[in-house]
Image (cartoon, rainbow, N blue to C red):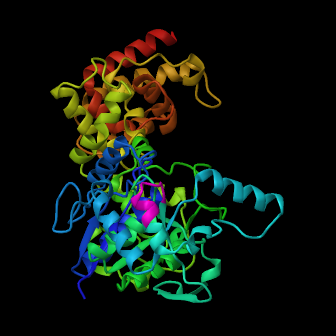
């Protein structure tokens, strides 16, 4: 069988974790089977679809770095891939379904439908949805009324007194009593636009989709889709409804748990590799004891059997762990390039954008922050002292535990002559040896020597590693900062 699957988002909001997980699993499944992955825009809800969300979709996936083979932006033999450009097809297929007695025309006004609903509510009836009034209009009469221009919709004629049975890869066999399906849902609206159900089924058939992998919340639509496929005389694709994504509290992942839109993750400085790696593991497991996967490794290992039935838990702490891992594994050059936009946005460079020398310094500084950073945004936050004048720390900060201000001044005076040599060391080990020798010679604790120096050079008791900072600041700046501190302290 030719494997073809698709991601079929409605552009009614920004891309979020759930959508990206669906797209990723479809991508991995298609790639792992040598198949084709399709993007189809389901923009039939004209009131809610917006162009900005289409742009957001393209930007998100170009950032994530995986792509479809066929789609609105790439073309393919089954286009157009945007549903609003396929209206005629849906009208044609709705007509076909009327001919096959799988659908009927409904002339009820929205006022009447509201009325039915209100009466039922008032009488506390257990029945919901359409009351199937127009189902009994003889087709010839309905044709005449339609030809005379009477407004109407086309509804699916759900066979009554039967069950609909289908198989889902993950859930197994699903049985649905037809009486429990939403009664005769609208397929074509009075304005000639299709509803999700009609457009989705027609397109999956025409685009020769072999597998539908999508979120579990779509499961209730499947019985009526299966009924439609049968009414058309078509085979339906195979279904695989993906496990829900939950927060740690077992509730469906939502804004209450944290960021869900991909834009937010990007703005926080999450790397695309970290997001892909982690999202690929939400609701699936590939290999015992292996956490880190490149996209290619995921492709090699993916199969529907690796998906789990139970909900996937989205743990923000784990995502942070992955992000830290991928930050550490970047070269200084790559990490600098990735975090530079955040640095500029945060105003790290006094003149706005960095010049060549500042860029070089920034790149060299990556080694100082790489080990501990969890988000890209933290990187420039820690490097202010390299590019800007630092405020003088309050005097009290300089005083060592159980010590005095004089001790801090003394320590600064003692390390001052060492700065030239320290700035020229190649490794932290070399610098540390020099410090140790000094502390032994002077009978001072290492910490009591280093803390005043750190404050003088970086303005803070917590900073990136001191020895590396001295190398990056250089002897001249370091000495000037020490002198300024000495002046301020005495
Ligand atoms: N347009 C639906 C959505 O927004 C697609 C559901 C499906 O994949 O069939 O998720």
Query: From what the image shows, is residue 344 above or below residue 15?
Result: above
* Quarter containing the N terminus: bottom left
The magenta stretch spans residue 150: yes
- Identify the residue at horizontal 65%, vertical 55% (top origin): 112
Residue 129 visible in the picture: yes
Q: Nearer the viewer, residue 392 or 314?
A: 314
Query: From what the image shows, is residue 464 above or below residue 18?
Result: above
- Identify the residue at horizontal 24%, vertical 41% (top origin): 337
Q: Nearer the viewer, residue 275 or 40?
A: 40
Say left or right for 58 vs 489: left
The magenta stretch spans residue 143: no
Q: Nearer the viewer, residue 434 or 483?
A: 483
Residue 293 visible in the picture: no
Magenta stretch, residue numbers: 144-152
Say left or right for 300 vs 317: left
Q: Position of residue 101 (x, y in %)?
A: 44, 80
Q: Position of residue 472 (x, y in %)?
A: 27, 32
Q: Quadrant of residue 24?
A: bottom left
Q: Position of residue 332 (x, y in %)?
A: 24, 46
């Amino acid at each position: 069988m030719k494997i073809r699957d698709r991601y079929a988002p409605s552009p009614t909001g920004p891309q979020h974790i759930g959508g990206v997980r669906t797209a990723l699993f479809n991508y991995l499944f298609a790639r792992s089977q040598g198949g084709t992955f399709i993007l189809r825009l389901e923009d039939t809800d004209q009131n809610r679809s917006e162009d900005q969300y289409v742009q957001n979709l393209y930007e998100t996936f170009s950032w994530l770095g995986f792509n479809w083979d066929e789609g609105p932006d790439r073309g393919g033999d089954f286009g157009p891939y945007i549903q609003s450009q396929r209206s005629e097809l849906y009208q044609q297929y709705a007509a076909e379904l009327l001919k096959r007695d799988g659908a009927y025309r409904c002339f009820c006004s929205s006022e009447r439908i509201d009325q039915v609903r209100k009466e039922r509510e008032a009488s506390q009836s257990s029945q919901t949805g359409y009351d199937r009034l127009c189902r009994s209009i003889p087709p010839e009469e309905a044709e005449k009324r339609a030809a005379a221009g009477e407004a109407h919709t086309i509804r699916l004629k759900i066979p009554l007194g039967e069950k609909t049975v289908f198989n889902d890869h993950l859930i197994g066999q699903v049985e649905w009593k037809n009486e429990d399906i939403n009664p005769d849902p609208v397929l074509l609206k009075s304005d000639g636009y299709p509803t999700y159900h009609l457009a989705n089924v027609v397109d999956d058939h025409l685009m020769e989709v072999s597998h539908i992998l999508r979120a579990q919340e779509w499961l209730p639509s499947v019985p009526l889709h299966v009924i439609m496929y049968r009414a058309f005389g078509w085979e339906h694709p195979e279904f695989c409804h993906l496990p829900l994504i939950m927060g740690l509290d077992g509730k469906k992942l939502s804004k209450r748990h944290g960021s869900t839109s991909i834009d937010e993750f990007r703005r926080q400085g999450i790397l695309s590799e970290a997001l892909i790696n982690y999202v690929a593991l939400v609701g699936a497991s590939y290999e015992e004891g292996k956490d880190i996967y490149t996209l290619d490794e995921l492709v090699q290992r993916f199969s529907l059997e690796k998906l789990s039935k139970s909900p996937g838990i989205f743990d923000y702490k784990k995502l942070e762990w992955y992000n830290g891992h991928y930050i550490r594994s970047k070269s200084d050059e790559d990490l600098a390039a990735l975090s530079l936009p955040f640095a500029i946005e945060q105003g790290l460079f006094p003149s706005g954008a960095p010049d060549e020398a500042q860029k070089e310094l920034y790149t060299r500084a990556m080694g100082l922050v790489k080990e501990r950073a969890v988000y890209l945004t933290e990187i420039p936050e820690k490097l202010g002292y390299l590019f800007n004048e630092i405020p003088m720390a309050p005097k009290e900060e300089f005083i060592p535990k159980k010590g005095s201000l004089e001790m801090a001044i003394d320590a600064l005076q003692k390390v001052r002559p060492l700065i030239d040599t320290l700035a020229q060391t190649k490794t932290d080990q070399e610098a540390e040896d020099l410090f140790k020798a000094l502390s032994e010679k002077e009978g001072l604790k290492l910490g009591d020597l280093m803390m005043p120096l750190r404050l003088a050079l970086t303005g803070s008791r917590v900073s990136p590693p001191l020895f590396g900072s001295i190398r990056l600041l250089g002897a001249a700046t370091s000495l000037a900062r020490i002198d300024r501190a000495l002046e301020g302290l005495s």
